[in-house]
Image: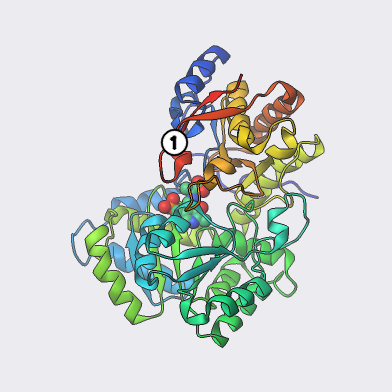
Amino acid sequence: MRRMAEPYRIKTVEPLQMTTREERQKAIEEAGYNTFLLPSKVCYIDLLTDSGTSAMSDRQWAHMMIGDEAYAGAKSFDLLQEAVQEHYGFPYVVPTHQGRGAEHLISRILIKPGQHVPGNMYFTTTRLHQEMAGATFHDVIIDEAHDPSAEHPFKGNIDLDKLRALIAEVGAENIAYVNLAVTVNLAGGQPVSMANIEAVRALCDEHAIILWSDATRLAENAYFIQEREEGYADKSCAQIAKEMLSHFDGLTMSGKKDCLVNIGGFLAMRSEDILLKARELVVVFEGMPTYGGLAGRDLEAMAIGLEEALDDNYLAHRIGQVRYLGQQLIDAGVPVVEPIGGHAVFLDARRFLPHLSQDELPAQALAAQLFLESGVRSMERGIVSAGRDEQGNHRYPALELVRLTIPRRVYTDRHMDVVADAVIECFKNRDSITGLKFVYEPSALRFFTSRFEKLA
Ligand code: F0G
């Protein structure tokens, strides 16, 4: 097979800092073994997140200069709205400062206290906003998604039987909406098939239930459909994305991922009623309905990035780069979530560190160790991220993962080689890695600011 290089050339560079092991030892201790608390200047290759870490194109930067900073009626809003109409097929858009701003608004609009929201696995901020609006979240993803080694081309799919059972149990009128994420972040960046989206839509129609999408990584999902689903090989990712979105009543978007910007998000919808309610709320929490907490230049960059992210060559390299890293780890016997997903390679900390119980926070410990060894920053996505239930007990997720998240258009494939070497080195020395315990734990979204100590 012909190799593919980065489909861009580099016009501006940001030098990277290299550190000594002693400096990293001091830094990770000061950060309480939480990679979120590390200063970025000590992170040689920063794979904490793909959120807001993209490199913008020359065209996006050019548009930053012509952003309209008017308080009301900015023409930059029109540009964004036209891009959403053309590429996503929704008539209405309400910008927000980022994805969780949109989640906040839609949860308040659609949820009545006591209602239920099914979704394909949870995302941290999404579930919290649903719960804060009074809903109970239900995971209705297929079982394979909870098994890191189960091979399935569309591991993000909703299990229709689980969804049917929930509807029968609580009654359709008590389901605020179904929230379908494309791709599924915490399952490992796993996609949802077009057939599954259509089937969920049909089931929602049968019961008059609203179908919403967390479309944060929709471009990556479209690529997997093109690659894996019959009948889509000859369609462009842009066409596939638009077809996917045609089945939804609306979406929340974190522009920090598949709109290739450093900040921004939005709600898009078909209903004028929901639009009016969103406009009423956005002025309270975010800003005027034509800027929603963003600068005009941010709206411009998002409008351009939204289109660039749907380019077939960009996506082929993007997904290919993630897979390139993942394959090196698989070849070395490192346990990872398979198949490799869209935005990240997820290390399976249970199999990586079988000598640690989940209470010893294996994924958190592994992320800290990887940083210490190499300066590569990753993120825990396991028991710490899952938080506590209403009774105050830890939630014990089936997946105990470390996420190596690849920023878009930022690192070269050579950086991926260095990351692979670092992980393989940790794997060789895995027996020496010890567990962690909490020494500080906040009440909500604890993974961001918790502090830990090494177990003796
Ligand atoms: N939905 C998904 C699937 C996400 O991955 C994120 C953010 C959000 C919603 C919230 O968007 O950050 O713009 O408010 N994920 C980031 C991550 C933080 O690192 O996975 P936001």
Q: Which residue position holds label 1?
A: 441
Q: Residue at x 53, y 20 (%)?
A: 18
Can residue 259 be seen here? The reply is no
- Residue 183 place in picture, x, y as percent: 59, 59
Q: Residues within 10 Å of mark 1 (few under 14, many from 20)?
A: some
Looking at the rendered structure, the number of numbered marks drawn on it comes to 1
- In the displayed orientation, state which residue is furthest to the top: 22
422 left or right of 393? right
Element under disc 1: loop
- Residue 49 place in picture, x, y as percent: 52, 42
Q: Residue at x 54, y 47 (%)?
A: 386
Can residue 14 be seen here? The reply is yes
- Image quadrant in which you'd find residue 376: top right
Amino acid type, callout 1: Glu
- In the displayed orientation, state which residue is furthest to the front: 391
Judge by depth and name the residue closer to the eye, 16 or 402: 402
Whether residue 324 is situated above or below residue 103 in the rendered picture: above
- Residue 53 place in picture, x, y as percent: 47, 43
Whether residue 424 is situated above or below residue 206 in the rendered picture: above
219 left or right of 125? right
- Image quadrant in which you'd find residue 132: bottom left
Distance from mark 1 CB to nearest ligand 1 atom below 8 Å = no
- Image quadrant in which you'd find residue 119: bottom right
146 left or right of 60? right
Judge by depth and name the residue closer to the eye, 212 or 247: 212
Whether residue 107 is situated above or below residue 243 in the rendered picture: above
- Residue 166 place in picture, x, y as percent: 59, 73
Judge by depth and name the residue closer to the eye, 122 or 53: 122
452 left or right of 222? left
Q: Where does the C terminus fall, quadrant-wise?
A: top right
- Report the colour scheme: rainbow
